[in-house]
Amino acid sequence: MEKISVAVRFRPSTAQNHLPDDRHWRIDDNRISLHRSLGTPISSVSFAFDHVFDQSSTNGTLYNQLTKPIIDAAVHGFNGTAFAYGQTSSGKTFTMNGSQEDPGIIHLAVKDIFHSTQMITDREFLIRVSYMEIYNEEINDLLSLGSQKLPIHESLERGIFVAGLREEIVNTAEQVFELIKLGEANRHFGETNMNARSSRSHTIFRMVIESSIKEPMSSGDVSNADAIRVSVLNLVDLAGSERIAKTGAGGVRLKEGKHINKSLMILGNVINKLSESGRQRAHIPYRDSKLTRILQPALGGNAKTSIICTVAPEEVHVEETRGTLQFASRAKRVTNCAQVNEILTDAALLKRQKLEIEELRTKLQGQHSEVLEQVILKQRNDMHKSELECEKLAMELEEERKSREALEQRLKEQEKKIRELTMSANQDSSSLHDRSASWSTCEELVNGNHDILEGDTFETPTFKARPNGFVVKRASFSGVLDSSPIPENFANVADEDLWTQLNKGCTTNLDMLQMTPNLKFQSRQATDVSIDLAFKEELGTKERCHGLESECNLNKRQLHDLKEKYTMLENECSLLRKEKASLVHTLSLSEQDIELLTSEKEELLKNLNTEKQKMKDLKEEIRLFSLAFTQREGLLTSLYSKSKAMVENLKASRAPMPELCDC
Ligand SMILES: Nc1ncnc2c1ncn2[C@@H]1O[C@H](COP(=O)(O)OP(=O)(O)OP(=O)(O)O)[C@@H](O)[C@H]1O
């Protein structure tokens, strides 16, 4: 694991007037802070980075300190990415492409790669080059004019790649420079208020470096020497973030600007997520833009990455610079996991497989087939387990579905009830309204000087027309009333509002009220009771309504939770299904293996039996031979002793014999 290395580069100031800025950036070693013109630091704005390059730094210095290690690693099989990030006109293209006098990162990297490959004498290299741009969220091939809107694909062998992108095999740096020239001609530039030649697209210059050892494979074991190293190097010049107000973009420029800002925002989001610690880190939105999708391995993946954040020193750009520095600070926390990318050649693979077969054979002869059988048994068990789990999940799923249906049903019923209750509440309130209306009618009648209200249950004292300002006066009444509608502490005079409230709009003479207090009170009470009842009923209905609604909301929430759980279970189920399928596949492969091995074992056993038989025959032959040999030996021994005896006899008989010449 290693962190992305991040550098900040200040471009020279372009300010026309040379008046001192109110605020300016100060560089102390690798720390940047914002200061007031008097030199007092603005404490909250201070950043530290791996490298900080001031306005006098050249592309060469930056390359040597920041990018060169990545280029060297790429030659040795590590993926690498270097990209320039920053606001428009801050010097990204200058850094990546450079000028005649001060060649940029791409130029220096290409030269270095060819130099290094020449220095490494024991390997042979194959280098391919491609050049693409992302313009308005579409990928165009800069080396082939016809290839536009190219799609991004992903495969096990190639990882993430742009389908249909032209790749040129190159042997010299000069060939590469020619291709870059061609690509630059096809690239989208445009004029804005901020930059006369502003990049309107993100460009990715890519080199794929393949290498293999020159020596033929040794006949021994398979080593790394037999593998091919493949590394991908991306050199990226991003389009700059821009404020429309500053760039003055409109029409095509505006559309481009929106696409640029959006993709940079997504890049920022990806960096943000990656910079969070493991626990907080959730889904990384690589797929939200083509840029982050293509750069995915460089951002938290298998690559060595460096970011050059370019900033403008002028005070007018302080906020944009601050934004870039914040991006850079977060990028500093991102870790990658780079490793050498090696692919085994067919020959090496063949050799490795042969070795594996040999190993298996030995294992088989050493009765290791049981181990294999155990492995298969374990796999079967695993498969069985996952099948059971799958079934369990399916059952749970079914139960969830049922309870969801039941809940939905309940929800429907409750909604129906609510509808009914609302309707009945409406009816109640309309009947209440009718009653109030009849009460008003009563008032109207009163105002019309009707003495008795026909067909109504209560009788009222004689009403008189409501006076305008003064409503009522207690003229002569002094007796205690059982059920007076006027409160005890009421003074002699009541104001119009209170009285109107008490009488629900009726005005009357209190002396008249005294004369028929019970009658009036009873009559009012009867109506009030019925109205109260209606109110209570309505209130009750409303409360029930509320209750049901909240229950309904609760159920909805439960339903929502259940739906989420259901989706989760479904996902889990599909994962298990996949696992099961892969297990079945592995099992069938293992079964094939065991079949093969069993037949090999049988063959070997047959051979062994034949050999055993041969050995038996040989032993028998040896036994017979040794028997014959012993017999012969006995014969020879007796022959020898016989002849020895004869010789001795002869010697003995020869001694007394007279000499023949004397005869
Ligand atoms: N370090 C530098 N030294 C000299 N000139 C520079 C430097 N950086 C930038 N410039 C000049 O500033 C201008 C803007 O730079 P450049 O086009 O590289 O910006 P950019 O960030 O790529 O802008 P855009 O995002 O709009 O494409 C150019 O004229 C460039 O030559």
Image (spheres, rainbow, N blue to C red):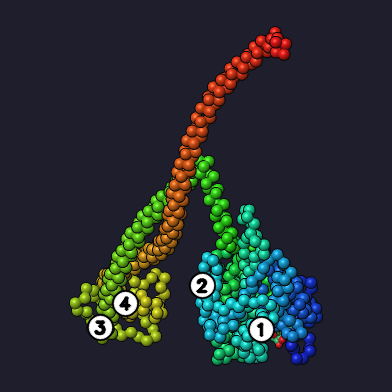
Name the one closer to the observer, 551 or 336.
336
Whether residue 541 is visible to the viewer of this picture, yes or no, is: no
Which amino acid is tagged 4?
A: Asp
Q: CA distance from mark 1 to mark 4?
A: 115 Å
SS at badge 4: helix
Mark nearer the N terminus (2 vs 1): 2
| Residue 84 percent location from the top left of the image | 67, 77
**Residues packed near mark 1 inside 10 Å, few (<14), some (14 to 19) or many (20 plus):** few
Dividing the image into four quarters, tell me where ligand 1 lies: bottom right
Q: CA distance from mark 2 to mark 1?
A: 28 Å
Mark nearer the N terminus (1 vs 4): 1
Contact, CB < 8 Å: mark 3 with mark 4? Answer: no
Residue assigned mark 1 = 178
Contact, CB < 8 Å: mark 2 with mark 4? Answer: no
Q: CA distance from mark 2 to mark 4?
A: 97 Å
Identify whether 30 is placed above or below 176. above
Q: CA distance from mark 2 to mark 3?
A: 86 Å
Contact, CB < 8 Å: mark 1 with mark 4? Answer: no
| Residue 496, quarter of picture | bottom left
Name the one closer to the observer, 298 or 646.
646
Residue at horizontal 29%, vertical 68%? 416
Please tell me whether mark 2 or mark 3 is closer to you in this view. 2
Q: CA distance from mark 3 to mark 4?
A: 21 Å
Which numbered tag is attached to residue 523? none
Which numbered tag is attached to residue 445? 3
SS at badge 2: strand
Residue assigned mark 4 = 511
Residue assigned mark 2 = 153
Which amino acid is tagged 1?
A: Glu
Please tell me whether mark 3 or mark 4 is closer to you in this view. 3
Mark nearer the N terminus (3 vs 1): 1
